[in-house]
Amino acid sequence: MELEQCVNATLCLDYKPKVVVGLRGSTANTFLDNAAYRDFIFQTFGVSSADMESTAVISLSNDYPVIVVRGLSDLAGAQEGQNSIDLFGPLAATNVANVVIQFVRKLSEESYSRS
């Protein structure tokens, strides 16, 4: 699926964003903007992304399967200068919304094709 690369006509990512499936993520009640800690959780737990939002929906302990779709907008402290979340957060939100819409459409297509 093609993702948007630009916030507007003058602000674009230097690279083409992509959908990545199957990585190990983490969630907590803190904003991660620390490269050393990011490296620690990757080395220790194999975590490739961290967010604050999916905590509320993690419910496997209650026997409900969950799929979390994340739109990553910054490098968790690895960037030079100011964190890019203010610039690229809206782009990540738009892209993740479009991914969820396509995912739900695919689920619906598969559900109807099995009937």
Image (cartoon, rainbow, N blue to C red):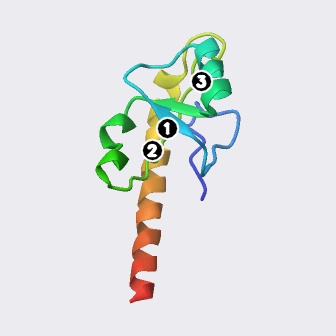
Q: Quadrant of the N terminus?
A: bottom right
Between marks 1 and 2, how big is the CA–CA gap? 5 Å
Amino acid type at image mark 1: Leu
Q: In the displayed structure, would residue 104 be above or below residue 35? A: below
Q: Is residue 14 above or below residue 113?
A: above
Nearer to us in this view, 80 or 11: 80
Residue type of the residue flagged with mark 3: Ile
Reading the image, the residue beneath label 3 is: 41
Quadrant hosting residue 12: top right
Question: Would residue 97 be seen by someone viewing this image from the given angle?
Answer: yes
Which residue ends up furthest to the top in the rendered image?
Answer: 81
Q: Quadrant of residue 24?
A: top right
Residue that lies at the very extreme toward the bottom in this rendered image: 115
Residue at the image position 60 percent from the left and 42 percent from the top: 5
Residue receiving disc 1: 91
Q: Are marks 3 and 1 in contact (CB under 8 Å)?
A: no
Q: Which mark is residue 94?
A: 2
Image depth: mark 2 or mark 3 in front: 3
Question: Dot 2: within a 10 Å radius of its alpha carbon, few (fewer than 14), some, or many (20 or more) residues?
Answer: some
User: Cβ–Cβ below 8 Å for labels 1 and 2?
Assistant: yes
Q: List x then y, in percent, for residue 112.
A: 39, 83
Q: Is residue 27 above or below residue 23?
A: above
- Under circle 2, the secondary element is helix
